[in-house]
Image: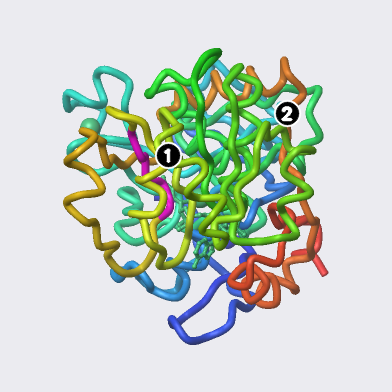
């Protein structure tokens, strides 16, 4: 297998900062596309993985799964893309393609486990995959997305994870006109959930712990805002929502949010805190509420979401950073101090 050396930023241990690294990538095989990365969003999952909070991180770890760039090379079997195209890669770069879930186009639920963009298994080189905090990436064409040309590519990068991770459950639970949806945790995922649910026609209720986001919520598209630390406000909204999308990255009391659901309502957890979240039986039983989870979205859903965002001019609210500022950005992410997504200008990797 021919390989190439690529500049990247990553970490060699859970307690170490991210720093410049050289990584090896495969050269394009028949069905691959090589992309020069222009922008990469900073997802809280990058931080969870770099610091081994979910366990199982293989080091060195190069995070990044909100990737937008220009195609530089394509394999002989690639027909859907050509050099010069704007393209994107999200959280998955492969799957088994044979199981029931893959066959029905739900690769994110592949029974063998989808191959994650970083900390997955690179089958050609038999080691971990490396993500988007790097100059270039080589990905099978079936896992490459088309970017709408009318969107700012930096602000559109977070659509590749934050966008589709909120889009998929909003679609699955049929959010639209006539539904009341609560979005908990207004970070990268949450603020995209607000924008998308609003564009789908739902009545959107923002539920935040941050007083500074109360004022901002309407600008993002919220119809109502609840400051979750205010018990009176939470009580006033009890049993009013059809769906709650929980995008919280840290420990929190899920029961408080379950109580906002109507009979038969669903709380869909997309946030993935390090430790388990206790649930009281009586948060579910008396009102037949559902507690569910959802992971990212399929390639088909990702493309649909990107096209929808192109049509409706939806992008993330971002703060553009240099790769050299990534460790400070992680600390700020932990404090909820970003409105609402850091995106790395990958040109800074050349410095
Ligand atoms: P983020 O930008 O850091 O946002 C998380 C938000 O959670 C914060 O802005 C804050 O919002 C809220 N929050 C933080 N600590 C809290 C606490 N103790 N109690 C209540 N709320 C708290 O993170 P993100 O990138 O959006 O990711 C969110 C989570 O989703 C992470 O755990 C990430 O790993 C996970 N994720 C899952 C999937 C999936 O496929 N399921 C995909 C991507 C990410 P407020 O200030 O509004 O309270
Ligand atoms: Zn992510
Ligand atoms: Zn599969």
Disc 1 crowd rating (10 Å Cα; few below 14, some 14-19, many 20+) is many
Q: Is residue 292 left or right of residue 175?
A: left
Give the residue pinned by disc 1: 296
Report the image quarter containing ligand 3. top left
Q: In the figure, is residue 196 to the left or right of 2?
A: right
Q: Residue at x 66, y 51 (%)?
A: 40
Which image quadrant is residue 107 in?
Answer: top left
Residue 309 on image: x %, y %: 67, 23
Nearer-the-camera pick, 344 or 217? 217
In-front residue for pair 62/225: 225
Q: Is residue 108 above or below residue 215?
A: above
Q: Residue at x 62, y 78 (%)?
A: 19
**From which residue to which does the magenta span run?**
266-271
- Identify the secondary structure beneath mark 1: loop
Q: Residue at x 63, y 76 (%)?
A: 331
**Color scheme of the displayed model:** rainbow
* C-alpha separation, residue under disc 2 versus residue under disc 1: 18 Å
Magenta stretch mostly in which secondary structure? Answer: strand
Placement of 45 over or under 2, stated as above or below: below
Spot occupied by residue 103 in the image (x, y as percentages of width and height): 24, 19
Q: Is residue 24 magenta?
A: no
- The residue tagged 2 is 314
Q: Does the beta carbon at disc 1 come under 8 Å from ligand 1?
A: yes
């Amino acid at each position: 297998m021919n390989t190439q050396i690529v500049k990247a930023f990553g970490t060699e241990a859970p307690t170490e900062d991210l720093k410049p690294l050289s990584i090896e990538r495969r050269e394009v095989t028949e069905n691959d596309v090589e992309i020069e990365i222009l922008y990469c969003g900073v997802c809280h999952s990058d931080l969870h993985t770099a610091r081994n909070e979910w366990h199982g991180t293989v080091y060195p770890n190069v995070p990044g799964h909100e990737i937008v760039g220009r195609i530089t090379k394509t394999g002989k079997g690639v027909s859907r893309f050509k050099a010069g195209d704007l393209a994107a890669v999200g959280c998955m770069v492969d799957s088994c393609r044979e199981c029931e879930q893959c066959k029905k186009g739900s690769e994110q639920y592949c029974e063998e486990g989808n191959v994650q963009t970083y900390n997955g298994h690179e089958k050609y080189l038999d080691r971990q995959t490396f993500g988007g905090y790097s100059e270039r990436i080589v990905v099978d064409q079936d896992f490459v997305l088309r970017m709408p040309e009318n969107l700012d590519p930096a602000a559109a990068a977070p659509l590749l994870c934050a966008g589709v991770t909120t889009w998929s459950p909003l679609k699955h639970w049929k959010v639209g006109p006539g539904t009341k949806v609560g979005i908990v945790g207004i970070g990268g995922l949450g603020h995209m959930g607000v924008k998308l649910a609003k564009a789908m026609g739902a009545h959107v209720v923002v539920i935040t712990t941050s007083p500074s986001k109360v004022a901002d919520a309407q600008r993002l598209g919220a119809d109502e805002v609840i400051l979750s630390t205010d018990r009176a406000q939470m009580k006033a909204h009890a049993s009013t929502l059809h769906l709650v999308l929980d995008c919280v990255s840290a420990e929190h009391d899920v029961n408080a949010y379950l109580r906002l659901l109507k009979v038969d309502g669903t709380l869909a957890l997309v946030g993935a805190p390090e430790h388990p979240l206790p649930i009281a039986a009586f948060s579910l039983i008396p009102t037949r509420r559902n507690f569910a989870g959802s992971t990212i979205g399929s390639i088909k859903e990702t493309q649909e979401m990107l096209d929808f965002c192109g049509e409706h001019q939806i992008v993330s609210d971002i703060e553009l950073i240099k790769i050299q500022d990534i460790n400070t950005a992680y600390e700020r992410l932990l404090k909820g101090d970003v409105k609402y997504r850091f995106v790395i200008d990958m040109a800074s990797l050349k410095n």
